[in-house]
Image (cartoon, coloured by chain):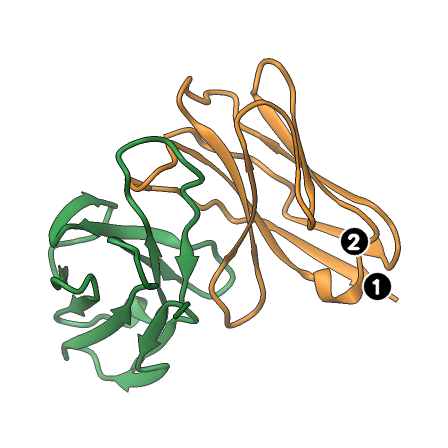
Amino acid sequence: LAKTTQPISMDSYEGQEVNITCSHNNIATNDYITWYQQFPSQGPRFIIQGYKTKVTNEVASLFIPADRKSSTLSLPRVSLSDTAVYYCLVGLSGGYNKLIFGAGTRLAVHP
Amino acid sequence: ETGVTQSPTHLIKTRGQQVTLRCSSQSGHNTVSWYQQALGQGPQFIFQYYREEENGRGNFPPRFSGLQFPNYSSELNVNALELDDSALYLCASSLASGLPNTGELFFGEGSRLTVL
């Protein structure tokens, strides 16, 4: 399974756009890229998933370049409630999930 | 729609004891995965169950075992508890179709295990 590398922590301020980049150099052809968010003492929560190019939902956007060796999660206009740990995962999605979580990126949003 | 529920939420055990954690998957989901999350770290994959069979296992010793029942609920059993087993144990359910799909995992709130 592809290993991912992402920044350990990031700081931002309310109202700013936050971009978290994840490297996955040995991503396989069938692998999807998925991002999860986790608040303290809670289970991770699915944010967004993509295979290539750009995906957007009501919460975030995911940008994936043509070589798919990296991806960027974009959170528009963050608020204090976006303070959490964000995990980038790469793997074959579908029911046979064996998604491997890394250490994640701790995002702190300041007033 | 009922979400993933786990029990107990917190428990304390002593070294050498055995523990059973329980998980009810989200309605309509047929696959359950278990993760161990130590403090300050990302969740580590323990194993996954699909149609009552183990369908993949992470780097955990045999004293970590599980079951999935016909109603797709699941149990995680840990024997001979060690101090390092102290962690948040997360259960996640999903719907397996055999084809790549959104593959979204729905996590429970976890069971916090403390081993003294």
Q: Is residue B24 left or right of residue A53?
A: left
Residue A36 drawn above or below residue B20: above
Residue A60, image x and y in percent?
69, 45
Query: B82 and A2: which one is in front?
Result: A2
| Label 2: which secondary element | strand
Q: Which residue is mark 1?
A: A110
In the rendered structure, which disc, 2 or 1, sits on the residue that comes first in sequence? 2
Residue B5 drawn above or below residue A105: below
Q: Chain of mark 2?
A: A
Residue A91: image quadrant is top left
Separation (CA) of disc 2 from disc 1: 7 Å
Residue B9, image x and y in percent?
37, 81
Task: Name the residue: 26% across, 53% down.
Answer: B46
Query: A65 and B115: which one is in front?
Result: A65
Q: Amino acid at mark 1?
A: His
Q: Quadrant of the N terminus of chain B?
A: bottom left
Q: Amino acid at mark 2?
A: Asp
Q: Which chain is green?
A: B
Q: Which mark is residue A87?
A: none
Task: Name the residue: 56% across, 21% down.
Answer: A69
Q: Which residue is mark 2?
A: A11
Q: Residues within 10 Å of mark 2 (few under 14, many from 20)?
A: few
Residue A38, image x and y in percent?
56, 60
Q: Residues within 10 Å of mark 1 (few under 14, many from 20)?
A: few
Q: Chain of mark 1?
A: A
| Label 1: which secondary element | strand
Q: Is residue A62 left or right of residue B18?
A: right
Task: Name the residue: 14% across, 79% down.
Answer: B17
Q: What color is chain A drawn in? A: orange
Task: Name the residue: 30% across, 85% down.
Answer: B12
Q: Are marks 2 and 1 in contact (CB under 8 Å)?
A: yes
Residue B32, image x and y in percent?
27, 56
